[in-house]
Image (tube, helix red, strand yellow):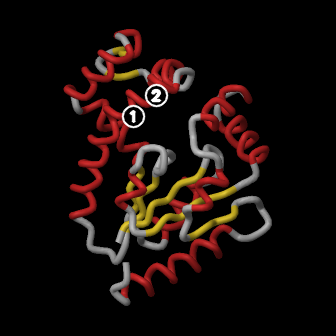
Amino acid sequence: MIIGLTGGIGSGKSTVAKIFEFLGVPVYEADAFSKTIIDTDKELQAEVVSLLGTEIIEEGKIVRPKMAELIFGDKNLLQKANDLIHPAVARHFQNWYENQSYPYVIKEAAILFESGSYKSCDKILVVAAPKEMRINRVMARSSMTREEVEARMNNQWPQEQKLEKADYIVTNDLTESVIKQVINIHENIIRTANSGSR
């Protein structure tokens, strides 16, 4: 059983993923694996460089800030880059998933909906938080300006649209324990998986 885990930038999806990992659930971090795949798959890397230009590469590796600067300012370029990268990540995930034996896995991806990979998930979990809180979190943990954070947000589905497709929701606004919410969802998924329902 595949549970897609997503949420807007700064929502706290990585924290939620870590709680699932602590509970023993295998977690596939699509964003982290996509970076590894781009760095190790020379054919894919060549296609990305061909699309974005040689200025994004240094010492045989793609320089993420340069790549981000190019693609997050141009939705057309972002879509073309995603069209190159996502099939490779999907293949990598499938190989990883086939080697798991736990009743379910978490597939964490920032753009689960935007990439279309939510279609291969059995259930969707969305981490939600107020926009202003998300902006402040991202600015506190990175060197991004407010404008850069908002530009990233504008390239993702709005939170309300993600929530409409959610089977499970974790609210990460400090009003309720995230750990308690995750444990409740975990227990529900285990019951569902053990009953053979998908």
Residue 19 point in image, percent of width and height: 54, 66
Question: Is the residue marked by circle 1 packed among few (<14), some (14-19), or many (20+) residues within 10 Å?
Answer: some
Q: Amino acid at mark 1?
A: Asn
Circle 1 is placed at which residue position? Answer: 82
- Give the structural element (helix, strand or loop) at label 1: helix
Question: Is the residue marked by circle 2 packed among few (<14), some (14-19), or many (20+) residues within 10 Å?
Answer: some
Vertical arrangement, residue 82 with respect to residue 20, above or below: above
Based on the displayed image, in which of its 4 quarters is residue 196 positioned?
bottom left
Instruction: Tell which of 18 and 182 is nearer to you.
Output: 182
- Give the structural element (helix, strand or loop) at label 2: helix
Q: Is 35 displayed left or right of 64 in the figure?
A: left
Residue 89 point in image, percent of width and height: 31, 44
Based on the displayed image, in which of its 4 quarters is residue 107 positioned?
bottom left
Vertical arrangement, residue 46 with respect to residue 152, above or below: above
Q: Quadrant of the C terminus?
A: bottom left
Residue 149 point in image, percent of width and height: 67, 33
How much space separates mark 1 and mark 2, taking CA atoms? 6 Å
Q: Quadrant of the N terminus?
A: bottom left
Q: Amino acid at mark 2?
A: Leu
User: How many callouts does the rendering have?
Assistant: 2
Circle 2 is placed at which residue position? Answer: 78
> Which residue is pictured at 69% across the width and 33% down the height?
150
Vertical arrangement, residue 182 with respect to residue 16, above or below: below
Residue 62 point in image, percent of width and height: 37, 22
> Which residue is pictured at 27% across the width and 67% down the height?
100
Q: Are marks 1 and 2 in contact (CB under 8 Å)?
A: yes
> Which residue is pictured at 61% across the width and 61% down the height?
164
Vertical arrangement, residue 95 with respect to residue 66, above or below: below
